Amino acid sequence: MSVQTPPTPLSGASAATSPQQRMEGTLPRWAPTAAFAGAAVVAALLSGFNIALFVIYTVVLGTLAVYVVSRVREGRRRAADRTVTSIVTSAFGIAMVPLVALIWEVVSRGAERLDAEFFTASLYGIIGEGGGAYHALMGTLIITGLTTLISVPIGLMTAIYLVEYAQGRLKRAITFFVDVMTGIPSIVAGLFAYALFVLIFGPGIRLGIMGAVALSVLMIPVVVRSAEEVLKLVPLELREASYALGVPKWRTITKVVIPTAIAGIGTGVTLAIARVIGETAPLLITVGITNATNFDPFDGRMATLPVYAYYQLTQPGVPPEFAIDRAWTAALLLIMLVMGLNVVARLISRFFAPKTGR
């Protein structure tokens, strides 16, 4: 007859980590927020209305307060976890400060001239008050459209070649040069386009198409890299199924591969357009500036929003406040265009992605 011994009670650390006691040793959710709020009050007193010192003191004192309270209540491991969480959250908040400050400054100073006249009038014959950026907005749209027409076919076909056809040294060489082009300074692209057209038309030439060629140098590698990564995500089984049915490779690419990856390709192209629409240095060299409206990119100078804002700020004339207001409004319009393109990219990715059946 066997004798069953009663289970021994938990002792030491095991007893200390029962569910009820763990709940009793957990800080309430509002504790970290309260610690940082208190640190912000102390930092406001210590910093003397210096924003940089206020942010530093708040982060340091708030993190220390969270660590001390958590160490006393929850233990060393949980305190270390909360400290790292506080540091990461604080880093995110600090990174958001300049972004929020930039948007606030541009909106507050640019919204004053965001009226109908700004979108319908040019600067032709305008010296002081009034005028708008209609000619610059049209120039930006025309040059960006030409850039897209040049860059998307070249970039997409290059990506298809790298994924579907290229092998060995040639593929590695093309990939290397695409990576190098991705890091080219924008001023170098402008100098390249200017030198190319000077060789053909002579010195002093300024054309809208020159700006499109310069921006294409910056946009093509972005399209290539984004399209290449998206095409690699297309399952190999889809290609093999198409080949098994006797479909040639070129038709498999156009009817199977590209439709499957069209959402990612559209997103990459849209983000590439957003990347180049605000470039200033290449357009300063190749397109220049004019106060009149010019819709022909093959005849004379054209105004663009980045260059328009640059000249309104650096050469405001007398009195300067009206030109500076126009510069801030042009900057706000550029931000709105870039944000709109990012929203379009997200919508493309959401609505045109292939359905997974989940």
Image (cartoon, rainbow, N blue to C red):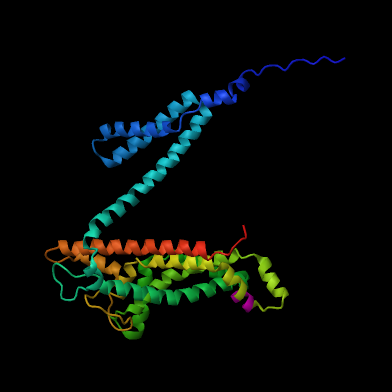
Task: Locate residue 110: give its quadrant.
Answer: bottom left
As displayed, is residue 194 above or below residue 263? below
Return the residue nearer the eye: 344 or 159: 344
Task: Locate residue 59: give its quadrant.
Answer: top left
Q: At x 49% / y 30%, what residue is drawn?
A: 79
Q: At x 36% / y 85%, what residue is drawn?
A: 200
Main SS of the magenta part reads helix
Q: Position of residue 252 (x, y in %)?
A: 64, 75
Q: Position of residue 274 (x, y in %)?
A: 40, 65
Q: At x 70% / y 74%, what residue is drawn?
A: 243
Return the residue found at the far bottom: 201
Q: Quadrant of the C terminus?
A: bottom right
Query: Could you tell whether 309 is left or right of 189 in the image?
Result: left
Q: Is residue 251 a member of the stretch shown in magenta?
A: yes
As displayed, is residue 358 above or below residue 7? below
Query: Could you tell whether 8 is left or right of 159 in the image?
Result: right
Q: At x 28% / y 69%, what residue is drawn?
A: 307
Q: Position of residue 191 (x, y in %)?
A: 35, 73
Query: Could you tell whether 259 is left or right of 240 in the image?
Result: left
Return the residue nearer the eye: 353 or 89: 353
Task: Locate residue 58: give its quadrant.
Answer: top left
Q: Is residue 226 visible?
A: yes
